[in-house]
Image (cartoon, rainbow, N blue to C red):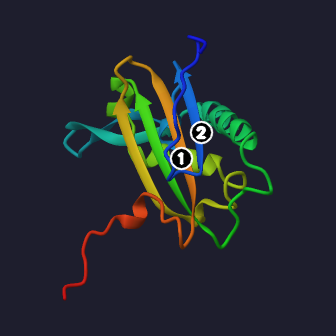
Amino acid sequence: MDENFISYDVNPNIDFLLPFYLGEEFVPTKQDSFKPIKVIERDEDGGEKINKNFYIKNDENELLIYFKEKIQNYAKNIFNENNKISKPNKVEVILSITLTEKRFKSVDVDNLAKTILDSLNNIAYEDDSQVSCLIVKKHIHPMKTNSLLIGVTKITDDRKGFGGNIFLFSKST
């Protein structure tokens, strides 16, 4: 085997696995499109108080567009009209997002997931409203790098996915 490649076995509970090594790049979010600004609030007596809950739109939407196109171009090599998961079928998506420590502390996991789910619209599935199970983990990579693994599974009567066996309560007998 060539030493420049890593081989791995895909979990049999996942229909499609999309791996991404991002290196210095990261999964951008709409959250990144805003940056905080300091606003000083003055009362009638001239006292000042800094209000930290104000944001302005940041011009980094290009990064979000670039990332979505990157995901879509790769996903188009895996999904086509024959294997795209069409409605009314349900979909399970599992995301493993490795981040640098700084990014881990500054970004919300739900915003990361939304970017990725939106990127797969009309490619892996018709619409992300089909996603009935979403499992997301963000974690710090030991090598201080960014990467992304996306698992997509069509939910059927026979294939329940990872989330098919998760119950938070059961009916008592």
Q: Residue at x 49, y 28 (%)?
A: 147
Residue 7: x and y in percent read 54, 26
Residue 108 in the image, given as x and y percentages of width and height? 38, 43
The quarter in which the C terminus is drawn is: bottom left
Question: Residue 24: image x %, image y %?
Answer: 51, 18
User: What residue is rendered at 56% in x and 56% in y?
Assistant: 153
User: Does the residue at mark 1 contact the one at mark 2 (Cβ under 8 Å)?
Assistant: yes
Measured along the vertical axis of the image, is residue 6 above or below residue 170? above
In percent of width and height, residue 142 lies at: 34, 20
Q: Is residue 164 left or right of residue 70?
A: left
- Labels 1 and 2: the sequence-earlier one: 2
Residue at the location (52% across, 31% down)?
8
Q: Which residue is mark 2?
A: 18
Looking at the rendered structure, the secondary structure element under dot 2 is strand
Local secondary structure at mark 1? strand
Q: Nearer the viewer, residue 130 or 6?
A: 6
Residue situated in front as seen by the camera: 145 or 15: 15
Residue at the spot of label 1? 151
Residue 113 shown left or right of residue 119 in the figure: left
In the image: residue 28, left or right of residue 62: left
Mark 2, residues whose alpha carbon is within 10 Å: few (<14), some, or many (≥20)? some
Number of residues whose C-alpha sits closer than 10 Å to that of mark 1, classed few (under 14), some (14–19) or many (20 or more): many
Q: Quadrant of the N terminus?
A: top right
* 144, above or below 73, in the image: above
